[in-house]
Image (cartoon, grey):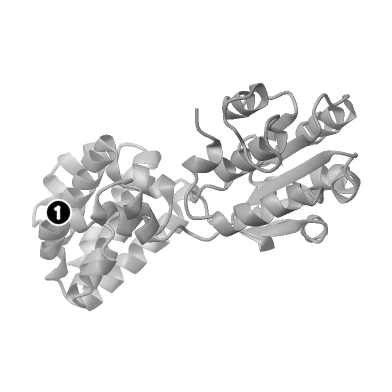
Amino acid sequence: MSSLEEQVFGHEKLFTAWKKLISSQQLEGTFLFVGVPGIGKIKAAYAMVQMALCEKSLNLACGECGPCLRVQNRQHESLLHIHSNGSMIKVESAHEILQFCQLQSLSKKRFVLIEEAEKMNLQTANILLKTLEEPPLGTIFILTSSSSTSVISTIKSRSKVFKFNPVSSQEMLKQNLGPDWAVFASQGRFDRLLTLTDPQNQILIKNALQVLTQILVSPNLLTDDFWRESLKSREDLKAYLQLWLSLIRDALYLQLNEQNSLVHADLKSEIVRIATFDAHKLDWVFTQLLELQKHLNFNKDAVLSIESLYIQSR
């Protein structure tokens, strides 16, 4: 069995800092792991918890002892992982944390991992504030967030910040995580890499490209039913809008001969057709799609919105 650290790439400096804290017996208090989504913050947190709870090593995880295996399986009794419930972390989660902290610990350390800490509402944060400032002896809090500015300032001020940067393309290529074009397009995000290489997503991207091309070039869009079937729901339109924006972005980069910046480099030959359009028109369509994306939650009809865009673009 291998340790979880061996499955995490690109954050070596943070692991070195964590190991020093364990070795010097200064691993205490509250930590805030900050970085864009999809770059491995949660996986790194589990790897660091595994190091601290390992029975066989001081600041490395053997990956074989009982605690190491329980952390790896996310079943360790000294680790509480709090997720947001929809759009926020509610008061019930705060009470669950306080109850966990009152239990007798059977390990040398105990951890509370709060994912997407920016989703704590003010009431939840206030309930936890004193505990975060002075955790019970042996209890360490790890909070993750996409941005430190999104976390309530009173919590941020009580935390040691670990900044996670996107993993370099060179590191991802070295690990053979995917084709070159997908690695470069992922911009250091593992979640984006998985999406780009997912077969089902590839079908969605090609359909989105087909509909976008229709919007731009077809003289018969208003009588064609293919794209209407593709946009039957608001969720479908959300997915298509995000893809259309990235495809138009790629077309604009092709016009500038910046081929290394393409998100969908595997579809270059098809995107070339979009790139033949005037840059001003592509900019205008891009802006309209952004506006549609902003107002999508106001019950706008997807089909009518696209029909309007098509008519205005003629």
Q: Position of residue 220 (x, y in %)?
A: 9, 52
Relative height, residue 88 to residue 36 (above, below): above
- Identified at 80% across, 28% down, the residue is 107
Q: Where is residue 271 in the image (x, y as percent from the top left)?
A: 16, 60
- Identified at 39% across, 49% down, the residue is 192
Q: Using residue 152 as the reference point, say whether residue 208 is left or right of it.
A: left
Q: Position of residue 64 (x, y in %)?
A: 58, 25
SS class, disc 1: helix
- Identified at 28% across, 67% down, the residue is 261
Image quarter in which the C terminus is found = bottom left
User: Is residue 157 visible to the viewer in this orientation of the structure?
Assistant: yes
Q: Position of residue 82 (x, y in %)?
A: 69, 35
User: Is residue 301 visible to the viewer in this orientation of the structure?
Assistant: no
Foreground residue, 105 or 21? 21
Mark 1 is surrounded, within 10 Å at the Cα level, by few (under 14), some (14 to 19) or many (20 or more) other residues, namely some
- Indicate the quadrant where residue 262 lies: bottom left
- The residue under label 1 is which amino acid type? Gln
- Indicate the quadrant where residue 287 lies: bottom left
Query: Circle 1 is placed at which residue position?
Result: 214
Q: How many marks?
A: 1
Q: Using residue 128 as the reference point, say whether residue 111 is left or right of it.
A: left
- Identified at 59% across, 33% down, the residue is 62
Foreground residue, 171 or 205? 171
Relative height, residue 222 to residue 94 (above, below): below
